[in-house]
Amino acid sequence: MAQVLEFKLPDLGEGLTEAEIVRWLVSVGDVVAVDQPVVEVETAKAMVEVPCPYGGVVTARFGEEGTELPVGAPLLTVAVGAETPPGDGTPDRPAGSGSGGSGAERPTSEGSGNVLVGYGTTAPAARRRRVRVRLGGSAPTEAAPVQTAPATATTAPTAIAVRTAEATVPTDARPDVRRGPVPVISPLVRKLARECGIDLREVAGSGPEGLILRSDVERAMAARTETVAPQAPQAPQVAQAPAPQGHRTPLRGIRGAVADKLSRSRREIPDATCWVDADATELMHARVAMNSATGPSAGPKISVLALFARICTAALARYPELNATVDMERREIVRLDEVHLGFAAQTERGLVVPVVRDAHARGAESLSAEFGRLTEAARAGTLTPGELTGGTFTLNNYGVFGVDGSTPIINHPEAAMLGVGRIVPKPWVHEGELAVRQVVQLSLTFDHRVCDGGTAGGFLRYVADCVEQPALLLRTL
């Protein structure tokens, strides 16, 4: 007899508490292998393909495409040890011996070790002892397998024995619910309940399998307020203006994450901006020379963004105060040793900031290749959470939108951001004469807690000097 295992939405890291189902990669009845991606979900950080740690036959899926599920909610169930259709290409797996006389077979494969945060496939955790509560004070005994199927999922037509933690005692005869575990996953929900004095054991959950959501706690708060509040005299009815009409878009996913991060940056960071115009003619000539080289010295094409990134890392080596973050709990400025350079990329799904790791150790060719790779992944929606976090300084090329200047919002918790406007021909005094030159406006938005204007101005002036005289970079090679 096959054993049905439930696979729940794992913790995807970075404090994410929910994800939206974008596309199912398997259907009910399909045979899946260990670590095979089964669903594509969208978090506030990126699109993620979630691999299943079990191999077998899919018996149920939970949630349609477009449904948002909290971390820990069931994704699907897999019948492990079930007979698979012949010729399906799935390698045979040895069946393990049953335990506890249940007759259920356990998977013997240890998996490949591919993991997301919160679960893995290398070593199954020890199973808890399943117990059933008896009335009259008798000792608990191990629950036997029961025939059941998920109530809210699309199930396979065959009945399969399922191990379940539900007691077989009738609902109205169960002991006080306060003695059981609290069905809540989100730490934010627990914090809200604790701050408001709500006992989660008295809250009925409206999520999957009775999971307690934030809305459940808020309803409990409202009910308690109505109970204890004295009957106040009715105030005169005041006509309220109707809600504005129009198309409403929920602030969730990437758009919601961007809104939260920008709002936090404005609340917490006292930012200031300085800017300067620079003659980029020589820099553009240098790029043409690099990209037109032939023979053994020729290499991949160098992008303008890569040249500005190389200038940034050289400037941060001179002014490391700007490669920092502020720890307000300890009231300390933390100066960082490595430069992980983020760059703003506009995609169909919204603004994302991929991060080039160890940018200070890369040359122009390596930076250009990594910018290209991350940009393609951003447009395809395949960036991982690790490629979107951990930046220490951000480079924002808003010149691609045809604008000259901007005062960008700092990417919290970083301390600064360099903005680059469009490079266009403008009148410029060159060597004492009026000439048409390629001019760019540079802006630096910085956290005034980490440095004063002298440091910020020195950084920006050095960047402008390198743009006007690229040979200055030779000093740092």
Image (tube, rainbow, N blue to C red):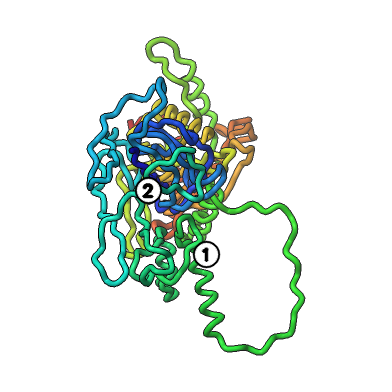
- Residue under the point 56% across and 39% down: 346
Please name the residue shown 38% across and 68% down the image.
174
Residue 469 against residue 5 in the figure, above or below = above
Q: Which mark is residue 215?
A: 1
Quadrant of the frame with the C terminus:
top left
Within-10-Å neighbours for mark 2: few <14, some 14–19, many 20+: many
| Secondary structure category for the residue under label 2 | loop
In percent of width and height, residue 62 lies at 49, 46
Q: Amino acid at mark 1?
A: Ser
The residue at the point 45 percent across, 59 percent down is 211
Mark closest to the chain's N terminus, 1 or 2: 1
Quarter holding the N terminus is top left
Q: Residue at x 51, y 61 (%)?
A: 206
The foreground one among 325 and 213 is 213
In the displayed structure image, the side of residue 132 where residue 353 appears, left or right: right
Residue 323 disc label: 2
Task: Work out whether residue 353 can be spotted.
Answer: no
Structural distance between the alpha carbons of marks 1 and 2: 40 Å
**For the residue marked with disc 2, what is the amino acid?**
Asn
Mark yes or no: residue 53 visible. Answer: yes
Q: What secondary structure is marked by label 1? A: helix
The residue carrying pointer 1 sits among few (fewer than 14), some (14 to 19) or many (20 or more) residues within 10 Å by Cα, namely few
> Which label sits on residue 430?
none
- Is the residue 305 above or below the residue 173 in the image? above
